[in-house]
Amino acid sequence: MLPRQERLTRSGEFREVCREGRRYAGGALVLYFLPGRPGTRLGLRVPRRVGTAVERNRVRRLLREAYRQLRGELPPGWYVLVARSECAGMGIMELREALGSLVKKAEADAR
């Protein structure tokens, strides 16, 4: 689990990022990024269409781990990751690559 100060926990925070932030879509993930916020915080949305509860929890664990591995490369701001149904069969390396490519797009726009 991520430390509380690195998580988006309130629905208002999720709404704010999705409404005011920039959206970057890839094949398996959608990344919403809201720059200019203190610190780097992450929120995850894994809808039911991804699969059963076991599959959704697995995707959440893998996305958190991919975020941990890329955390040092991320520009400061708030992030919301939305998993698509393609995530269900992916491994950690594939999810990390997908997240990395979306972060590069966000990083280029943040400058």
Image: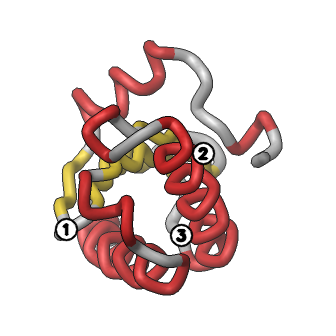
Identify the element where label 1 is drawn: loop
Q: Residue at x 46, y 15 (%)?
A: 11
How far apart, in angstroms, are the residues tagged by discs 3 and 1?
Answer: 17 Å
Q: How is the image coloured?
A: secondary structure
Pointer 2 residue: 41
Separation of marks 3 and 2 at Cα, in angstroms: 10 Å
Residue 108 position by quadrant:
bottom left
Residue name at image x 24 percent, y 68 percent? 109
Q: Position of residue 106 (x, y in %)?
A: 31, 67
**Circle nearer the N terminus (3, 1):** 1
Give SS at disc 3: loop
Image location of residue 79, percent across then percent down: 45, 48
Which residue is located at x 50 percent, y 36 percent?
53
Q: State the mark number for residue 34.
A: none
Q: Relative to 15, is 109 on the left or the right?
A: left
Between the C-alphas of marks 1 and 2, the distance is 20 Å
Disc 1 residue type (three-letter): Gly
Quick one: label 3 or label 2, which is nearer the N terminus?
2
Above-or-below relation of 111 to 63: below
Q: Which mark is residue 26?
A: 1
From the top left corner, tell me how far across and down residue 5 is, in percent. 76, 37
The image quarter containing residue 12 is top left
Q: Residues within 10 Å of mark 2 (few under 14, many from 20)?
A: many
| In front: label 1 or label 2 | 1
In the image: residue 16, left or right of residue 55 = left
Q: Quadrant of the C terminus?
A: bottom left
Residue 74 is labelled as 3
The vertical placement of 51 against 87, above or below, is above
Kind of element beneath mark 2 = strand
